[in-house]
């Protein structure tokens, strides 16, 4: 059995600022709109607006708690060295092996948002390892009380869900905001292209391809 190191988990919701992510996505909408061609505008304009806005509207992922799986693991844990039972002139930590439960939580949505701090947060963000479609965290088995172990797991999941709910609160109103921006940028690009096209047509030459 592979022995992993306990607490090699990242702090979640702690790397990027929510407002910074929104600003970056707004700039991306402007960038994508500015690259559209007149041919692109042959499709339904409202569909273009909706698709562009939806692609860059931040949305919290969802924990698929009904599909959580667990596995027993052995993990290395550090504890303060007992100076009375060991070398009295050396202080430090001992590494011991403990049984633990490795919990895998499937996720629907963009797991990158587990790195984004919502506008509301506290001083104790949850910890887990982030994968492409799931989170993994470890709970040490420190008793034979299954109810206590289950409670520890539930508390970890609830802590993650609390931050996701804060993200959802942060995102209120964003879909409308992003759609308005997408519409404005696409309308501007369409007008820009049409004006340039009309200018060339007014030169009195045959248009290439006609």
Image: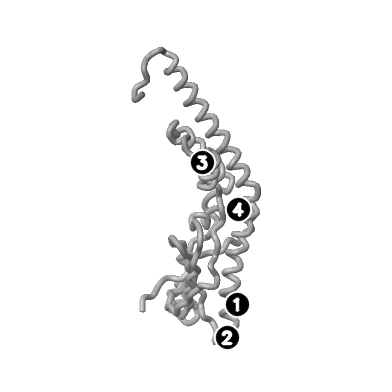
Q: Which residue is mark 3?
A: 48
- Furthest toward the front, the residue is 210
SS state under label 3: helix
Lower position in the chain sequence, tag 1 or tag 2: 2
SS state under label 2: loop
C-alpha span from label 2 to label 4: 35 Å
Q: Which residue is mark 4?
A: 118
52 displayed left or right of 165: left
C-alpha span from label 3 to label 2: 56 Å
Classify 10 Å Cα crowding around label 1: few (below 14), some (14-19), many (20 and above).
few
**Can you tell which mark lies on residue 145?**
2
For this rendering, which residue is in front, 123 or 105? 105
Q: Is residue 50 at all visible to an observer of this figure?
A: yes
Quick check: marks 3 and 4 in contact, CB under 8 Å?
A: no
Image position, residue 103 (x, y; %):
49, 73
Compared to residue 175, the image places residue 131 above or below, namely below
Lower position in the chain sequence, tag 1 or tag 4: 4
Q: Which residue is mark 1?
A: 151
């Amino acid at each position: 059995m592979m022995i992993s190191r306990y607490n090699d988990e990242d702090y979640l919701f702690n790397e990027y600022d929510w407002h910074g992510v929104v600003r970056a996505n707004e700039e991306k909408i402007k960038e994508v709109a500015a690259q559209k061609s007149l041919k692109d505008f042959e499709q339904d304009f409202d569909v273009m607006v909706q698709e562009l806005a939806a692609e860059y509207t931040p949305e919290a992922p969802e924990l698929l708690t009904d599909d959580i799986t667990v596995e027993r693991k052995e993990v290395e844990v550090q504890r303060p060295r007992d100076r009375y039972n060991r070398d009295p002139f050396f202080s430090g930590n001992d590494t011991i092996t403990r049984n633990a439960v490795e919990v895998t939580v499937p996720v629907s949505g963009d797991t990158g948002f587990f790195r984004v701090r919502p506008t509301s947060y506290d001083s104790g963000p949850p910890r887990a390892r982030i994968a492409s479609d799931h989170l993994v965290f470890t709970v040490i088995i420190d008793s034979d009380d299954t109810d206590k172990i289950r409670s520890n797991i539930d508390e970890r999941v609830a802590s993650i869900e609390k931050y996701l709910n804060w993200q959802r609160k942060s995102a209120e109103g964003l879909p409308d905001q992003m759609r308005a921006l997408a519409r404005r940028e696409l309308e501007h690009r369409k007008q820009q292209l049409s004006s340039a096209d009309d200018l060339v047509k007014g030169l009195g030459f045959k248009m290439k391809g006609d």
